[in-house]
Amino acid sequence: MFHSAALKLTTWYLAIIMSLSIIFSLALYGVSSADLGHSANRQVSYYNGFLSPYDLNNYSLIRQKELDQDESHLRNRLIWLNVVVLVTGGMVSYALARRTLEPIEEALESQKRFAADASHELRTPLTAMQTEIEVALRNPKMTQTEAVAQLQSNLEEVGKLKSLSEGLLKLASSGNADLTQTVDLKNVVASASDRLLKTARVKKIKLVLKTSKVNVRGDAQNLSDLAAILIDNAIKYSSSGSTVNVSCGRQKKYAFIKVSDQGQGIAAVDLPKIFDRFYRADSSRTKTHTDGYGLGLALAKKIADSHNGHIEVQSTVGKGSSFSVYLPLA
Ligand code: ADP
């Protein structure tokens, strides 16, 4: 599909180049042959006073022949020039067409991958639900207690589907941030930690905030989501009784948010992949950490990117992880 689009675009580019080249060649030919004609006429009239009418006639015929030859040379050169323009223009047009289409091709490819990944993830809870319902329907002696347990299990799967679709929606809609608003990261971190205080308390994890006022440009809600993802992960992947430190402030030309935990850490092989959509390190797929689809860090990165910032991570297995977000100062 993209090959034929590239060929179509090449044809259009080439048509524009060739039209311009032919118009310029015709104009050049017209102007040059008029100039050559005038110069020949001037020479013939110059010799008018010195030569006899017979010699003048001969001279005029010779000049006319020279003029015809010059015009023929000019025509041939212009034709060759246009052939060269056609060949090089064709190659340049094709390269340009491929370059124009490349980002569209990449976007389409990534959209296809996104749809494939999403449907794969959606299928797992749906299949689980389908199997459970089918087994229940085949059991005519199902008691009320069993039916309630069945519905509860289905509700759990529906909850998973809901959180997955919410994650997907957020990921799809968080590409463009409105950078006209000034946001204080101190407030952003405060609102994100507020959202996770209860989770931390339930898991008996101490949240320690060390924040100073620092302004960035962006979307307060998106930035709060970003901070919440990092804090949520820090809590999720730490054991009970540990501490999660959250800080924000200014470092050189950047404003930063830093979330450090004393949790399980991330293996070096996983570090380059944790920001990929749907990627979960094997250690996170255990029974204790089933809540998650590997969308959080992909969303966090997308939000940081849309604010012209970036995320860095340092981690040691068994000791803990530290995620830092750097954003341009307002
Ligand atoms: P999720 O937490 O839903 O699995 P994320 O995209 O937020 O998805 O994280 C991707 C993976 O990165 C996690 O599955 C986990 O393996 C790893 N990870 C992220 N944050 C931490 C952390 N603070 N400590 C240890 N591992 C982490």
Image: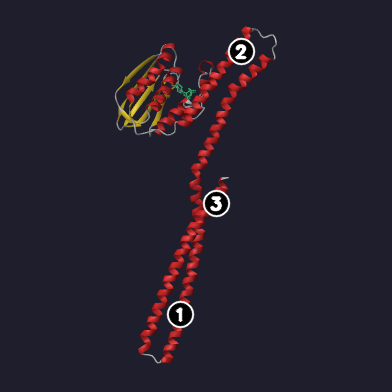
In the rendered image, residue 174, in percent from the top left (x then y), is placed at 44, 31
Q: Earlier in the sequence, mark 1 or mark 3?
A: 3
For disc 2, the neighbor class at 10 Å (few under 14, some 14 to 19, many from 20) is some
Q: Residue at x 51, y 15 (%)?
A: 288
Residue 2: give its label.
none
| Amino acid type, residue under disc 1 in the picture | Glu
**Alpha-carbon distance for marks 2 and 3?**
58 Å
Mark 2–mark 1 CB contact (< 8 Å): no
The residue identified by callout 2 is 150
Of residues 1 and 246, which is closer to you in this image? 1
For disc 1, the neighbor class at 10 Å (few under 14, some 14 to 19, many from 20) is some
Q: Residue at x 42, y 90 (%)?
A: 55
SS type, badge 3: helix
In the rendered image, residue 49, in percent from the top left (x then y), is placed at 35, 89
The residue identified by callout 3 is 8
SS type, badge 2: helix
Q: Residue at x 55, y 35 (%)?
A: 112
Which mark's residue is nearer the viewer, 2 or 1?
Answer: 2
Left or right: where 257 falls relative to 299: left
Q: From what the image shows, is residue 132 above or below residue 83?
A: above
| Amino acid type, residue under disc 3 in the picture | Lys
The residue identified by callout 1 is 66
